[in-house]
Image: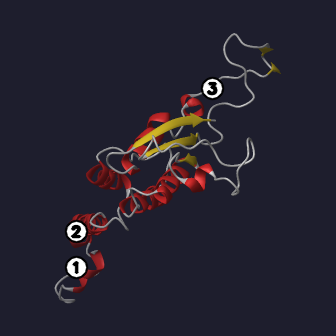
Amino acid sequence: MLARLASLLPLRWFPDPSPVLSALLAGLSDGWAWLYSMLGYARLQTRIATATDSFLDLVSLDCFGGTLPRRTGESDDSFRARIRRELLRERATRPALVSVLTDLTGRAPVIFEPARPADTGAYGVALGYGVAGGWGSLALPFQVFVTAFRPLGAGVPNVAGWGVGAGGWGVGAIEYASRPMIEAQVADADITTAIARTMPVATIGWTRISD
């Protein structure tokens, strides 16, 4: 900006060097440079593909009302990918339920529909106690049993809890744990919310959450 301002002045009007003029132009150019960078930053925030920082959090809040917050330490690119995936997510189908839980936890759920022969099996078709299929019932229409799994790696592994086991300084499985170490990125409430948002209207999803 300083060079652009200086280039507009007649060359013979001021001596070279001119410290007073340089200071004046530097002050003006600094303000214009800040404004130009702010305009560029504001332009980025108008699209999900380029939004950054807290503006990306505002995009999520506007679109999902707080149901899709940024995870602890999550980068803009990772958060942006989750927002775009959620905007175009399929709903109200069995594959949609598998997809949303797999994306959320990293583990595919087990889904059983008691009124679906492909799940229950049939005589002569993949049927046997403890082998395949399940006990079906037409008395449970529009209902599904979902076993969702918590993400792997949550918590503080291989360390005993308070008052459990023996440990000391440098001896045994004991250590100080910080809040980020014990807070799971995906809570059970997040799993049940994802199921509720994906299930069709007037259906029931009996849910079990397992490790």
Q: Position of residue 77 (x, y in %)?
A: 47, 61
In the image, 139: left or right of 131? left
Residue tagged by mark 1? 5
Tag 1 near tag 2, CB within 8 Å: yes
> Which quarter of the picture shows residue 14?
bottom left
Please tell me which residue lies in front, 4 or 177: 177
Q: Secondary structure at mark 3?
A: loop
Q: Residue at x 19, y 85 (%)?
A: 8
The amino acid sitting under disc 2 is: Trp
- Compared with residue 166, is residue 80 higher up or lower down, i.e. above or below? below
Q: Residue at x 50, y 48 (%)?
A: 115
Residue tagged by mark 2? 32
Residue tagged by mark 3? 177
Q: Position of residue 34 (x, y in %)?
A: 27, 64
In the image, 87: left or right of 154? left
The amino acid sitting under disc 1 is: Leu
- Compared with residue 20, is residue 191 higher up or lower down, i.e. above or below? above
In the image, 116: left or right of 154? left
The amino acid sitting under disc 3 is: Ala
Q: CA distance from mark 1 to mark 3?
A: 57 Å
Q: Residue at x 22, y 64 (%)?
A: 31
Task: Inspect this view and state whether residue 187 appears.
Answer: no
Neighbour tally class for label 3: few under 14, some 14-19, many 20 plus, Cα within 10 Å: few
Q: Residue at x 66, y 23 (%)?
A: 176
In the image, 81: left or right of 151? left
Camera-near label (2 vs 3) is 3
Camera-near label (1 vs 2) is 2
Quadrant of the frame with the C terminus: top right
Q: Secondary structure at mark 1?
A: helix
